[in-house]
Image (cartoon, helix red, strand yellow):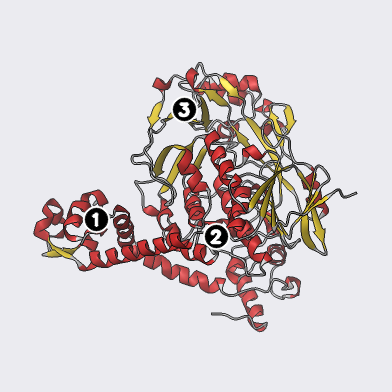
Amino acid sequence: MIGLVRNRDFDILVVGGGHAGVEAALASARMGRKAAIVTMDADKLALMSCNPAIGGIGKSQLVKEIDALGGLMAEAADATGIQFRRLNLSRGPAVWSTRAQADRIAYTRFVVDYVSRHRRVDVIEAEATRILTERGHVAGVELDSGEVILAPAVIVASGTFLGGLIHIGQKKIKAGRMGEKAACRLSDSLRELGFEVGRLKTGTPPRLDGDSIDWSLCARQPGEEPPPFFSARSPRRSLKQATCHLTYTTDETKAIVTANFTRSPIFSGQINSRGPRYCPSIETKFHRFVDKERHQIFLEPEGAGTSEIYPNGFSTALPEDLQWEAIRTVVGLERARITKPGYAIEYDFCPAYQIKPSLVTRRLPGLFFAGQINGTSGYEEAAAQGLIAGVNAALQIADEPPLVFDRSEAYIGVMVDDLCTRSTTEPYRMFTSRAEYRLSLREDNARDRLNDYARKYGLVPAEECAEFARLRERTEAAVAHFASTRIRIAELGELGRRFKRHTTVSLANLLKQPNISLDMALPLLARFDGGFSDDRQVVERAAIIIRYSGYVDKQQREIDKFKKMERVRIPDDLDYDSLTGLKKEAIEKLAQYRPGSLGQAGRIEGVTPGDVAVLSVHLRKRGVAFP
């Protein structure tokens, strides 16, 4: 019997209050929709259940894109960050990546306070147990109380709570996070609706008492000054930055862990699901990299008001007594005290062939998946999916076309395309290496790429969009000025030796020279740049554009070829079994993933260039337009 129906005139219901759920609700609310977040603890929105950090290689690009589209993650990281630095600065800007160590508790409080003040977002403290349908469309959710909430769009952003099972040695605990109950009935509801449900695994290290660590034996990793904040809308603030440290495992660590593989549920057969390849447990590290003498452990503070430390790199599911024994063999941790044990957690997910690039499910219109339910791992990946799901849920209600980025437009587009075209057998993580057009998808130009979308969908206030348009115009003027302004070689001093065969050189060519940093060039720019050097942001943007213009132009030609294939649209109802000339494997994969374009079809595992050629012939016969 269905209980009381509660209809609060919600347009969108979001199941889960993690990073994906929060961004989903806020994005749809910015577009004028009334949203509700259904979560089991209203005080733990966007809780950092693992590493208290935002950004990093490949991930900061997602954070900047979320920010460009009006999302909250960058602002929350800036407001609660205790250390900021940029990675990969010795390489090109395509892989520069910002990372912030955040105060874990302050981050959640910031998000809870922000959401509580938003007039179009409500938070309902309950467990969603069933997805409701009506006439083949999603209709709402049922709560554990029996109460029903109706809405024309539902976004499931369940994180690790869906059938969550924690493992510490042989001990098993049904939980979505340590100390919080799992959501098991919702998985059954998804199965009843015909969705394939699988299992994945992730893990977390033990937390340590910082007062028990010998910091003198660990290498300091200070923050960067001035702090490189994520968001352009964050107020700049003075900050006494926390210090992270680096240490290493020892031969003793390896001996203890390898001697006790059978006591770890990862190797004993207790856990059968796959974990993240790029963030393995300490057991997996010693098993997979047998010849490696030691492994890095990054000691990262959990916040400004606590001594608790996160030993990044020491994720484990060993029994608690062995965790104590092994952690005390790490350099500097000989007397370390564990405040919380590490653990592995298994959870349910739905393989992503069941969603479209808009993140709506293929099986049930109006139902969207975002975050770890799609097989991804990480706060940033989840938040980006949540934002896209929120936008597209709002657009679907308005009967408007969805927002879908292609691989040349955004890291978000790369991630979603990867999910929709590849078999997810382990938790997916974003890297710069996944983006073939990464030189054009830098973190510094996220707003350049996405500002028009933010304005079109009302995700960012109009005055903010206009302000950025002025910044872009000023940048273009600086680029033109640097290209047209020439200075005499004699005025360059030591730098002039690079231009022996010339009498003058343009400021643009000066900036293109290898080993000439912006700081080296600034004194000269200040004399000849017509006042542009007064605005460091403009000069930095212009310098990057000038330095990499040749490479970007070459990549743009590759993007143009890519877009031709993307513009060849494949009808969603195409009967692949009726197409002659395709291999059986290609027919099965194309029918399963149902690509939206000829380009996407070519990226599906098991579909060869020959299959794409055959498919293109059939599409031409059916009158599909080719560019």
Horizontally, residue 603 falls left or right of residue 511, namely: right
Estimate the spatial distance between the alpha carbons at disc 2 and disc 1, rounded to whole Å. 35 Å
Estimate the spatial distance between the alpha carbons at disc 1 and disc 3, rounded to whole Å. 44 Å
**Mark 2 and mark 1 residues within 8 Å of each other at the beta carbon:** no
Amino acid type shown at disc 3: Tyr
Q: Secondary structure at mark 3?
A: strand
Whether 488 is drawn above or below 253: the answer is below
Task: Classify mark 1: residues with Cα within 10 Å, few (<14), some (14-19) or many (20+).
Answer: some
Horizontally, residue 15 falls left or right of residue 307, namely: right
Q: Label 3: which residue?
A: 248
Q: Nearer the viewer, residue 471 or 574?
A: 471
* Mark 2 or 1, nearer chain start: 2
Amino acid type shown at disc 1: Ser
Q: Label 2: which residue?
A: 413
Amino acid type shown at disc 2: Gly
Task: Classify mark 3: residues with Cα within 10 Å, few (<14), some (14-19) or many (20+).
Answer: some
Horizontally, residue 623 falls left or right of residue 96, namely: right
**Mark 3 and mark 2 residues within 8 Å of each other at the beta carbon:** no
Whether 223 is drawn above or below 253: the answer is below
Q: Residue at x 59, y 46 (%)?
A: 115
Label 2 or label 1, whichever lies nearer to me, is: 1
Instruction: From the top left corner, tell me how far across and down residue 395 is, in percent.
Output: 63, 65
Question: Would residue 333 be visible to someone looking at this image?
Answer: yes
Task: Classify mark 2: residues with Cα within 10 Å, few (<14), some (14-19) or many (20+).
Answer: some
Label 1 or label 3, whichever lies nearer to me, is: 1
Q: Residue furthest top?
A: 335
Q: Label 1: which residue?
A: 533
Q: Residue at x 67, y 65 (%)?
A: 396
Q: Residue at x 62, y 35 (%)?
A: 203
Estimate the spatial distance between the alpha carbons at disc 3 and disc 2, rounded to whole Å. 37 Å
